[in-house]
Image: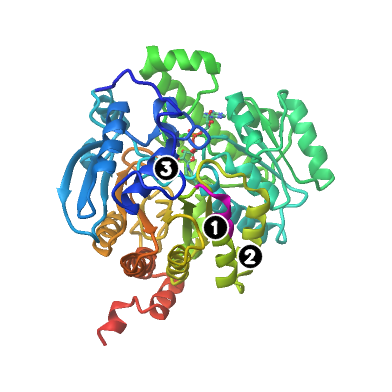
Amino acid sequence: METTKKYNPETYKTPTGSQLNCKGWVQEAALRMLLNNLDPEVAERPEDLIVYGGRGKAARNFESLDLIIKALKDLEEDETLVVQSGKPVGILPTHKDAPKVLISNSQLVPNWANWKHFDELEKKGLMMYGQMTAGSWIYIGSQGIVQGTYETFSAIANKDFDGSLKGTLTVTAGLGGMGGAQPLAVTMNDGVCVVAEVEQWRIDKRIKTKYLDESIEDMDAAIDRALEAKKNQERVSIGVPCNAVHLLERLKERNVIPDVLTDQTSAHDPLIGYVPHQISLEESNVLREQDPDKYEELSYESMYRHVELMLELQKAGAITFDYGNNLRARAQEKGLKNAFDFPGFVPAYIRPLFCEGKGPFRWAALSGDLADIAETDRVIKELFPENESLMRWMDMAQERIAFQGLPSRICWLGQGEREKAGLAFNKLVKEGKVKAPIVIGRDHLDTGSVASPNRETEAMLDGSDAVADWPLLNALVNTAGGASWVSLHHGGGVGMGYSIHAGMVIVADGTDDAEKRLKRVLRNDPGMGVIRHADAGYDIATDTARKHKLDIKERLK
Ligand code: NAD
C-alpha cells in the first residue's frame, strides 16, 4: 500500500566516509548503493522512487524503503534480508559467506507475464518493476551504459566507416538514464549526433552532466546545424525537444539520410515509457491517467509509424539498428510484418565480446571520495596495459565523465580480468590505500546473466534465444559463491514477457573472507556466460572456456 511520504534528499542522503551505520561493510554497501540509486543526481525521478528505464524502481514504496533501510542497519553478519519486488519480507538465518540480501523483482508465471497483469498487481501495491540495476541497487547513472554504448558505436565505426565516425551523422531519440549516454558515445567516436527528446528537462540534465553539447528548439535549425558540423567534421551532439517520429518525418521530407540510425526511447513500456507523436507531451500526461487503454492504442500506432520510418531511412542508406528497447516487437505486435528487417545491436556488434566473458563490470567508492576512484583507475591501467581500447576508454572516461552520486567507474572486462581487478581492489582496501571498501557489480545486460530473445540473446547460433535456464543458474551460482547481494528479475530492458535476468554485487572490504568470495564469484559469474555461449556453438567462447578451464569435457577427460 502506498504511503503518502515524499522523497526527502536529506533523509535519504547516501552516507559516505569510513564510519559504519550498519553491523558490517557488506550490509553498509547495500544501504549506500540503495540510497545512491535514489540520489537526485543519479535517479531520473526519485520522488516516485524511479531510478531509470521507464518505471524502474529501487523500492516498492516509501514504507518499504524505510523498512529496508531499518533492516539493513539491523542485519547481522550471518543473516540474509529477503526482498520481494521492492518490499522486505523476511530476515532469515544463513551464514557469513551467504549473500546479505536476496532480491526477486517482477517475476510472473509465464502465462500471466504481460504488462496488463503487471499493471493490475502494481495498482494493488503487490509488485514493482525493477528494470535491471534499479531494483538490484547497482545503478551508477548514465556512466553505467556509456562504455557499452561507446563500444557499440566504435564497432560501427570499425565495420562501416574506416575506424571513426568523423564526418558522419547519427540520429537517435531518448535522453533518459540510459539513452542519455548516446550523444557522448557518438562524440567520443568523433561523430555528430542529433537526438529527439520530448522532455526539455532531460535535455538540460544531459547538458549539465556533460553527456550532451547543445539544445536547439527548432527542428530545421537543429538539422542545419548538424549538416554543417558533419561537413566540417566537427564533434558535436545536439538535443532537439521533439518527438522521435516528427524528427524522422522531417528528415525524410528534407531527404536528409542519417549515416547511422537508432532509438532509445522507453519503447519497452507502451504506457509509462513511450510518448506517442499524435498528441503533445502535456496531453499525453493527462491521457495516461484518464484513459490508459486509449494511451496504449496511440502508443502502439506511434511505434508502428516510428519503425516504418526507420525502415524507410534504412532503405535509403542509413545503417539502422534496434538499441535494446523492444521497439521492433511493439511495431510487429501492431501488425508491421517486416519490423525485424533491421538487426538488434547485440548480434550486430556485441556478441563476440560476450563470448570472451566481457561485459559491463563496474565499481563504486563507498567512501564517496574521488581520490579512491583515481586509485582504482591507476590499478586498472597497471593491470591491463596491453588492452589498447581499454586504455583509450580509461583516458576518455577520466577526462569526460562527470560522476553522479558516489564516484564510480565502468569498464568492459572479460574472463580472468574481472577476477584480477576485484582481487587488486580488495588489496587496496586491505592496505588502506582507499578510505573505505569498494563495491563491485555489473549490469544484467551481461554475458551469462540474461535471456532476452529480442536483445541479448537475439539470433543465437543454436536457436536457444528464449532458453531462460541460464540466468537462473547464474543467480544460483552467484548465491553459492557468496556474492554480497543477488537478484533475479523479469522484464528488464524489453518489458514484461520478454526477458529474465540476474544481478550480482560483491563487496571488496579488504578481508581474507572477501578475497575468497571475490575469487569464486568473479570467476564464476562471467564463466557462466562463456559456458552459455560455448554451449550455443560459438568458437570464441569454446576457446575462452578451454583457456580458463571452464570446459566440462576437458575437466572430465
Ligand atoms: P528512460 O525512461 O529514463 O528514458 C526514456 C526517454 O525517452 C525519456 O526521456 C522520454 O522522455 C523519452 N521519450 C519517450 N518517448 C519518446 C518519443 N516518442 N520521442 C522522443 N523521446 C521520447 O529510459 P532509459 O533508461 O534511457 O532507457 C531507454 C530504453 O533503452 C529503455 O527501453 C531501456 O530498457 C533500453 N535500454 C537499452 C540499453 C542498451 O544498452 N541498449 C540498456 C538499458 C536500457
The amino acid type found where label 3 is placed reads Gly
What colour-coding does the image apply? rainbow
Q: Earlier in the sequence, mark 2 or mark 3?
A: 2
From mark 2 to mark 1, how far is it between C-alphas? 20 Å
Mark 1 = which residue? 349
**Which of the two discs, 2 and 3, sits closer to the camera?**
2
Q: Is residue 381 above or below residue 42?
A: below
The percent position of residue 179, horizontal first and vertical second, equals: 55, 40
Q: Secondary structure at mark 3?
A: loop
Q: Ligand 1 near label 3 (Cβ, under 8 Å)?
A: yes
Q: Which residues are magenta?
A: 368-374
From mark 2 to mark 3, how far is it between C-alphas? 29 Å
Mark 2 = which residue? 391
Q: Secondary structure at mark 1?
A: helix
Say the numbered circle drawn on residue 493. 3
Q: Is residue 288 above or below residue 450?
A: above
Classify mark 2: residues with Cα within 10 Å, few (<14), some (14-19) or many (20+): some
Say the numbered circle drawn on residue 311. none
The percent position of residue 241, horizontal first and vertical second, equals: 64, 25
Q: Give the overall secondary structure of the magenta segment.
A: helix
Q: Is residue 455 above or below residue 221?
A: below
The amino acid type found where label 1 is placed reads Tyr
Q: Is residue 472 magenta?
A: no
Q: Earlier in the sequence, mark 1 or mark 3?
A: 1
